[in-house]
Image (cartoon, helix red, strand yellow):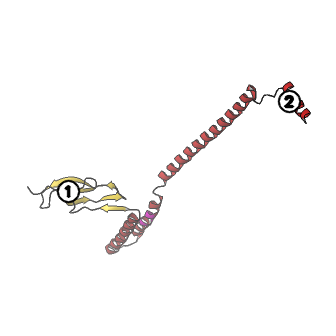
Amino acid sequence: MQDDIKINAEAAESHPAKEIMPSLEELLKAAELQAAEHHDAWLRAKAETENMRRRAAEDVDKARKFAVENFAGELLAVKDSLEAALAADSPSVENMKDGVELTLKQLVAVFGKFNLHDIDPMGEKFDPHLHQAIQVVESEQPANTVVTVLQKGYRLHERTLRPALVMVAKGKD
C-alpha cells in the first residue's frame, strides 16, 4: 500500500495538474455568446414594447371614435319618433303636442341614462362654474341670485357642457 502512495506521489510530481482555468479564447467566445443572447433578448423586448405601444394607441383611437356609440344608439329611438310624427298624414295639433311630449320624455330618459342633466338655476345663487351671466338687473332678490334663465345649461356627470345663460340680481342698494 505504501508503494501505491509513492507511485501516485511520483506521478503527481512528474505530471503537473492541468490548468483548471479556461483559456482567454474560450472566455471570449463565452462572453460573445452571452452578449449575443442579451442583444437578442433586448431586441425582442424592444419589439414587444413597440407592439404594446401601437396596440394601446389603436385602442385609444377606437375608444375616441366609438365613445358615443351607446348614446347614439339610444338617440335613434328619439329620431324615429320625430320622423313618425312628421310622416303622419293629417295630424291634429293635440296629437302633435302629445307626440312631442312623449318624444321629449324619451330624450330625457336617454339623457338620464347617460348622466346628462340640465342646469335650471332659477332662484339659485350665481355660480360661474354652472352659469353664464348675460345681464345684471335690479331686483328685490338678494344680490347674485339668478332671476331669469334665458337658456338651460347641461352637465355630463360632473362636467359642465354648457353653462346656463342667466340674468342675475344686482341686489338692493
Prevailing SS of the magenta stretch: helix
Which structural element holds mark 2? Answer: helix
Horizontal side, residue 5 vs residue 120: left or right? right
Q: Is residue 51 left or right of residue 171?
A: right
Q: Earlier in the sequence, mark 2 or mark 1?
A: 2
- Residue 28 versus residue 107: which sits nearer the camera? 28
Label ID, residue 167: 1
Extent of the magenta region = 74-78
Residue 46 versus residue 90 in the image, above or below: above
Give the label on residue 61, or none: none
Q: Amino acid at mark 2?
A: Ala
Q: Looking at the image, is 146 positioned above or below residue 6?
A: below
Q: Tell me where residue 75 appears, x and y as whole percent.
A: 43, 63
Relative depth, front residue between 107 and 24: 24
Identify the image quadrant of the N terminus.
Answer: top right
Q: Can you give x and y, in whole percent of width and height, for residue 126 in the image?
A: 22, 56
Q: To which residue does mark 2 refer?
A: 9
Q: Amino acid at mark 1?
A: Met
- Graded by Cα atoms within 10 Å as few (under 14), some (14 to 19) or many (20 or more), the crowding at tag 2 reads few
